[in-house]
Image (cartoon, grey):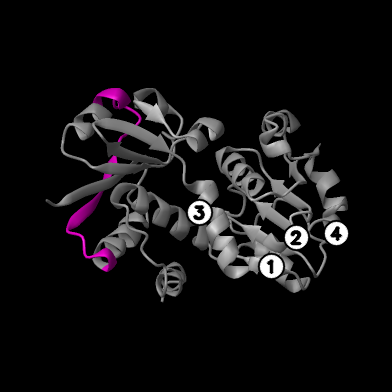
Amino acid sequence: MSLKLGLIGYPVQHSLSPWIHNRFLEKAGIDGTYSLFEIGPDSVFEQELEKLKTSGLNGFNVTVPYKKKVIACMDELDWKAEQTGAVNTVAHQNGKWIGYNTDGTGYVHGLKEKYPTIFKDTASRILIIGAGGAARGIYQALAAEGFSQIDIANRTPSSAETIAQSGFNGVQTAVMGLQEAEKALDHYRLIIQTTAVGMKPNVEEQIISLDKVSTDSVVSDIVYQPLTTSFLQDAYRRGASVHHGHTMLLYQAQYAFQLWTSEKVPIGEMEQQLKNVLEGR
């Protein structure tokens, strides 16, 4: 039987998910397809989703703007999806459509591959910039790793307060504005930018200045188009270590593929290949 997988969202035509998952299928020796299913704003989302669910799909990814809207169409939610309030992966298991969120786990796996020493000192302070769905998932995954101090900086502090008040795993969290975060950057071992600031076409934008960043810090940006954002360029110039966003894309996809197939396909050379794609080589 051929596996039928895909991605729903709007727009999706420039997604890299088919490139990633078709390679996973090939590496795992599984016969299958991964297709794009664009659901436009003029469509009735629930009707379009029902058509897809009855078309023989085994599972699918979900991207903007449907990560929250799809929840009402699920039979069950995994605890991570429930905690984050967003679904990015759906699997058809035992006759049920189950919603998952692989973003936070994917981020942590990618970070561990590049900077494993960070995880040896869970007393290290972490700063997350932004308070959207990605920030919530990453916060949750880092808390599960045992980090005790994860602070959040956001333009709208009330959004960050919602994450901080979750009390996940007993984590201590200070909420601050962006200017306050700029002044305290030297306190943090890991700084993670989770907003869309700096994404193409607005590549010159940078959410905060890194004047006070420590050379001992790792500065991470989940934006991967461009691969090296203005934020990461600034960090590199100041002597900090940098972590690129395309690894999160790969490792969250790896986890999604494992949910669909029970196969954990090694990333291996795919990280460099994806980097080449993003750099237009």
Disc 1 target residue: 117
Q: Residue 135 placed where, x, y %?
A: 61, 43
Given this view, does label 3 or label 2 mark the residue nearer the observer?
A: 2
* Left or right of residue 87, residue 178 in this image: right
The mark that comes first in sequence, 4 or 1, is 1
Q: Is residue 176 visible?
A: no
Q: Residue 20 placed where, x, y %?
A: 35, 61
The mark that comes first in sequence, 1 or 3, is 3
Q: Amino acid at mark 3?
A: Gly
**Closer to the camera in the image, 120 or 193:** 120
From mark 2 to mark 1, how far is it between C-alphas? Answer: 7 Å
At 77% from the left and 73% from the top, the residue drawn is 239
In the rendered structure, which segment of residues is drawn in magenta? 27-47
* Left or right of residue 57, residue 100 in this image: right
Q: Residue 269 placed where, x, y %?
A: 41, 75
Q: Which mark is residue 121?
A: 2
* Mark 1 closeness class: few <14, some 14–19, many ≥20 residues within 10 Å: few
Q: Are marks 4 and 3 in contact (CB under 8 Å)?
A: no
Disc 4 target residue: 186
Q: Amino acid at mark 2?
A: Asp
From mark 4 to mark 1, how far is it between C-alphas? Answer: 18 Å
Where disc 1 sits, the SS reads helix
Where disc 3 sits, the SS reads helix
Magenta-drawn stretch contains 28 = yes
Given this view, does label 4 or label 3 mark the residue nearer the observer?
A: 3
